[in-house]
Amino acid sequence: MPLITTESKGVFVIAVTPFTDTLAVDMASVDSVTDFYFDKGADGLTILGMMGEAPKLTQGEALDITRRTLARAEGRPVVVGVSAPGLAAIDELTRAVMDMGAAGVMVAPPGTLKTDDQIFAYYQSVVDTIGADVPLVLQDFPLVTGIHISSSLLGRIVEAMPSIVMLKHEDWPGLAKISDIRAAEAKGRRRLSVLCGNGGVFLPEEMERGADGAMTGFAFPEMMVDVVRLAGAGDMERAQDIFDAYLPLVRYEQQPGLGLAVRKHTLHKRGAIASPQQRRPGAPLAPRAVAEVDRLIARQERKLKDIG
Amino acid sequence: MPLITTESKGVFVIAVTPFTDTLAVDMASVDSVTDFYFDKGADGLTILGMMGEAPKLTQGEALDITRRTLARAEGRPVVVGVSAPGLAAIDELTRAVMDMGAAGVMVAPPGTLKTDDQIFAYYQSVVDTIGADVPLVLQDFPLVTGIHISSSLLGRIVEAMPSIVMLKHEDWPGLAKISDIRAAEAKGRRRLSVLCGNGGVFLPEEMERGADGAMTGFAFPEMMVDVVRLAGAGDMERAQDIFDAYLPLVRYEQQPGLGLAVRKHTLHKRGAIASPQQRRPGAPLAPRAVAEVDRLIARQERKLKDIG
Amino acid sequence: MPLITTESKGVFVIAVTPFTDTLAVDMASVDSVTDFYFDKGADGLTILGMMGEAPKLTQGEALDITRRTLARAEGRPVVVGVSAPGLAAIDELTRAVMDMGAAGVMVAPPGTLKTDDQIFAYYQSVVDTIGADVPLVLQDFPLVTGIHISSSLLGRIVEAMPSIVMLKHEDWPGLAKISDIRAAEAKGRRRLSVLCGNGGVFLPEEMERGADGAMTGFAFPEMMVDVVRLAGAGDMERAQDIFDAYLPLVRYEQQPGLGLAVRKHTLHKRGAIASPQQRRPGAPLAPRAVAEVDRLIARQERKLKDIG
Amino acid sequence: MPLITTESKGVFVIAVTPFTDTLAVDMASVDSVTDFYFDKGADGLTILGMMGEAPKLTQGEALDITRRTLARAEGRPVVVGVSAPGLAAIDELTRAVMDMGAAGVMVAPPGTLKTDDQIFAYYQSVVDTIGADVPLVLQDFPLVTGIHISSSLLGRIVEAMPSIVMLKHEDWPGLAKISDIRAAEAKGRRRLSVLCGNGGVFLPEEMERGADGAMTGFAFPEMMVDVVRLAGAGDMERAQDIFDAYLPLVRYEQQPGLGLAVRKHTLHKRGAIASPQQRRPGAPLAPRAVAEVDRLIARQERKLKDIG
C-alpha cells in the first residue's frame, strides 16, 4: 500500500462518514462516497477527521469504516485521523489502521497544551509512541483546536521529527505560514508536504504561495482538482475564474459547526450518500438554509456554464 | 443630533482611524475618510471600534477623533465604540461622546464573562452606569470576544433593557440568529435593529433573513450600499451578482488580524486616507499580500464591468 | 449491586490507576489500592476519572480495570467516569460498566460547549443516549473543563433530568453554589447529592454549607472521612483542627498537573501502590518536590500527634 | 525616588483601592492603608494591580491615587500597574507615574497573545514604547490572563530585555519555574528579582526555591514579612509554623473573584480602610462568608498564640 511522503501532492478529500436515517454507519454509502471522490479526481482521501464525525463513532465502527474505505480505494492513498484524548488510544488505532494499509495518520494537538514547548513535546510523544516509521500529518487548525503553532515552532518540529511528512494547513490567516515554510526550505530545511484545508476558501492564493494541494472536504471536489491542476500548470487566471464560481458556496459551507450539514446535504443531493443524517450533536440543515444552499448551487451551475 | 433607534436601517461603516507615517493621528485623513464613506452612500458611521484601533489610542486622541468626525459628519449619525476594561471608563467616555453629539454607543462584552447570567448582568451594569437614555449597540462578535450569546439569552437582554436598540451582528454562523430574532418579534417581542458585520461576507443571506443593513468596514462600502438597497427592493439576484463580484476581496479582507492591513491598504489606494499605517501590534501588509490584493481588485473591476 | 442515589453521602475516593514501572496497568496494585481506600474508611470509589488517567488507557484496559475494581470492592459502590469526545463512546462504555455492576457513571462537559443552552442540551443528549435509568454524576470542574455552570443553569438541568442524582462539585469558588442548591431544595426542588472535589481544600466549609461528603483523591482519605464524620456529628471545631493539620499537603497536592505525581508518590510511600509511575504526559515528581512533600508529611504527622 | 532593580527583595504588598460607601475613591483610606502596610513591615507597595481594581478607575482617578500613595510612602518604593488594552495608554500612564516618582511599572500580557513569539514581541513592544530606562515588572499570572510563559520563553525575554528587572511570579504550579530561573542564573544568565504572588499560598516553598520575597495582597502582610525574614535567616521550620497558622485564611482569600471581597472585609475589620466596598462587578461578601472568614480569623489568632 502506498504511504504519503514529503513529496505528496494533489487533492486529498476529507471524507464524510455516512449514516443511515437511523444513524447506523451506512457501509454502502461508504463505498459510493469513496467512488464519488475518486471519480471527481481526488488523489487520496482522509477519513475519520473532525468533519468525518470521528469522535461520534465507537472504536469498532471506526475500524470497520477504515477497512471498508481502504478496500474500496483499491490502492489509492487513504490517511486516517487518529486524534484521541490519550496516547494509548492513538497508538492502538494507529497500529490497527497501518496494518490495514493506511497511507499515514493525522493528529491534531489537544486543546490543553499551553506553550510552544508543550506542543513540541506532545508531537515528540506521539512520534515516540506510534514509531518514527509511520508517516504523520500534523493538523494545524487553531480555529477548532485553540492551539496556535507559529512558523518558528513548526520549524523546530519539522527539524526534530522527520516522520511528520505533511502539514494539513488550516491556520487562518495562514498564507504567510506557507511562504515561511517554503522560504525555510529554500535555505536548506527539509521539505514538508503542505495540503490546505479550511474548505478551500484560500486555495488559489495558497497554491501560488507554494502549497502542494488541498486536504479538505468541499462537496464539489472537482473545484479543488481543477484549481490545483491549473495552478500547477501556471494558469492562475483560469484557476481563479473557476474558484470564484464556487466561492459563494465555499463560503457558506465553511460556517463552523453548520458546515458539515451543508456538505452532507450537498453530497446527498449529488447522489454520493444515501442520507444527509449526522449523529448528535450535529444539527440537521434547517429548511431556510436548504433553500439558501440550493439557490447558491443553481447560481454556481449558471456561472460555470458562463465561463465554459 | 440624531440618535439611533430600533428602526435604524442601512449601512453604518466601521471607520478606520488614520495615522500619519509617524503614527500620529491624521486629522486631515479623518476628514477625507469620513467624506469618502458618505460619498459612497453610507447612512452613518461607527468609530472607535475594534477595527478603528480604539485600544491603541489615548483617551485624549479618542475624544479628538470623535469631535472631528462628528463635525465632518454634519448631522449624520455616528456611533462610538466605548468598550473598556471597566465601567468607570465606559461611563466617562460615553458621557463625553454623547455630549459631543454621538448617535449612540457600542459595547462588546469582556472576555472574562463565563455564564449567561454573567453576560446578562454585565449589560445590565452598563445600562445602569451610562443611563437608560443612551442608545446602546450590543456588539455580538464571539470570534474575537470569546463570548457566545445564544438566541435565548439575547431575548432576555432585549426584553430587560430597552435602551439596547441595535445589534451589531457578527456571530458566525449567525444566520439562524437573525431568523430567531425576527420570529420572536413576530410573536410580540419588541423590535431590535440588526446591522451585520463580519466584513459583509454573508450580507445577501442576512438581508433575506431580515437584517436591517450592515455595520462593517469593507473598503468598498458601495458594495454594501448596493446590496442593502437591492435587497430592500426585492432584487436578490442582482444583489447577489454584485456581492459575488466583490466576494473574493471580502473573503481576503476578512482574515482575522490581517484584515485591517488589507482594508487600510485599499482605502489608501482609493485615496481615502493618506497613509496605510497602523499602530503596533498592527502588521503592515507584506509585499506578497499587496500583490494578491491588487490582483483581486483588478479582477473585481473587470467583473463589475461585465455585470454592468 | 448498589446504585448511587440523590441520598448518597460520605466519601467516594477518586482512585488512581496504578501502573508498573514499565507502564503496564498493575492489576495487583488495583487490588491493593482498592483495599487501601476502603481500609481508610471510604464509602465508595470513583474510577476512570481525570485523576485516574482515564484518557491514557485503551478501552480494553479501562474495562479490565473496572472489572477488577468491582470484584475487589465486594458490593461497595463504584462510580465510573465515562467522559469521552462523543456520545457513541460514552454509550458503549456506560453499557459495559453498568452491566459489570457499576453504581453509576460520571460525565464532565466537553470544552467545546459555548452557552447555557448548549450545556443543557449536552446533558440531555447524554441522558437520552445512556438511558434515564442509569444514575449519572455531573462533574462540575470549570478549572479543567473551561465550562462554567451557573446555579440557575444547574437548576434547569436538575429539574429536567432526574437521572442526574449527584453533583461532583469542584467549581472554585464554589461555596455559594452549595448554598444555592440547598436553598432551592428548601423551596421544593428535588434533592441532589453533592460530593465535593478539589482535593478537599474547602471540605469543612463545604460540609457546613450542606454538602453530603467528598469525592476527591487526596492521598490521606482518612482526613476526608474524619472531617465528613465530625461535621455530620456537628463537631466543626474538631473537624477543622484535623483538616488544618493536613492542609499544607492538601494545598501542595492540589497543584494542577502536578497533583497526581504528588498523590501517587504519597500512595506509593504509604504502600498502597507498587510504583508511582504515570503514563505520559504525566511528569514524575522531581527530587526537589519529593523533599518538599516528605517534609510536609513529617510535619503533618507531628501535628496530628499534637491534636491527639 | 528609589527604583526597583534586579536585586530588589522583601515584601511588596499589592494594595487595595479603597472606596467610600458611595463608591468614590476614598483618599483618606489610601493614606491609612498605605500606613497600615508599611506598619506591618512591607518593603514596598504595588498599586493599580488587578486586585487594586485598576480597570474600574478612570484615568484621572488612577493618577490621583498614585500621587497620593507616593506622597504617603515617603520615599519607599511603589510599583504601579499600567496594563491596558493598548500601548498608547500604557505609555501615557507610565510616563505620568514615573514622573511622579514610581519605582517601576508592572505589565501583564493581554489574553489575545497566542504563541511564544507573540508574547516575546509584546514585551519587546512595551519596552520599546516606554523606554528601556523604566524598570519593568513582568506579571506572570496565567490563571487570570490565560497566557502561559514557559521557562524557556521567560529566558529569552530576560536575555533580550534588561529593563525587565522583576518577575511577579504567580504561575500555578510555579515552584519549578523558580528553580529553573535560579539554575539558569547559576550558569551565567543575568539576575532577575522574583517576588511571588498567589496570595502567598506557596510562600515557604517559594523562598526555599530561591524567591526574593512576596508581591501579593494577603490581608495579614505580617505573615509574609515574617516568612520572608525567617526564610532569609534559614529558620524554615519557624517560617512554616507561622505560615501554617495563617494558611486556612490564605486559602480562603485566594478564591478567584471572591478573594478581594475577603481581603477588603478583613482590612476593614482591621481598621485599615473605612469601607469594604468594591466597585462593580465586585460582589460584596455574603453574610455566610463573613461568618466563615471571621471564624477563620479567630482560630488563626488562637494558633498564633499557641506557637508564641
Image (cartoon, coloured by chain):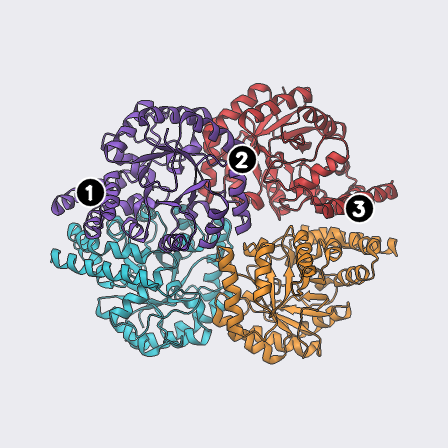
Chain colours: A red, B orange, C purple, D cyan
- Give residue B292's position: percent from left, percent from top: 72, 50
Question: Cα distance, mark 3 to mark 2?
Answer: 36 Å
- Of the residues tagged 3 and 1, which is closer to the observer? 3
Q: What label sits on residue C129 in the rendered view? A: 2
Chain containing mark 2: C
Residue at image mark 1 = C295
Q: Three-letter amino acid code at disc 3?
A: Arg
Vertical comparison of B220 with D237: above or below:
below
- Give residue C219's position: percent from left, percent from top: 27, 38
Q: Is residue D160 left or right of residue C126?
A: left
Q: Secondary structure at mark 3?
A: helix
Residue C168 image-quadrant placement: top left
Q: Three-letter amino acid code at disc 1?
A: Arg
Residue B5 image-quadrant placement: bottom right
Front residue of D53 and C96: C96
Front residue of A228 and B13: B13
Vertical comparison of D106 with A96: above or below:
below
Location of the N terminus of chain C (image quadrant): top left
Residue at image mark 3 = A295
Residue A273 image-quadrant placement: top right
Q: Secondary structure at mark 1?
A: helix
In percent of the image, x 61 and y 21: which residue is there? Answer: A67
Q: Is residue C35 left or right of residue B272?
A: left
Q: Three-letter amino acid code at disc 2?
A: Thr
Question: Can marks 3 and 2 be said to lie on one chain?
Answer: no
- Give residue B293's position: percent from left, percent from top: 72, 53
In percent of the image, x 15 and y 53: which residue is there? Answer: D238
Question: Can marks 3 and 1 be said to lie on one chain?
Answer: no
Q: Secondary structure at mark 2?
A: helix
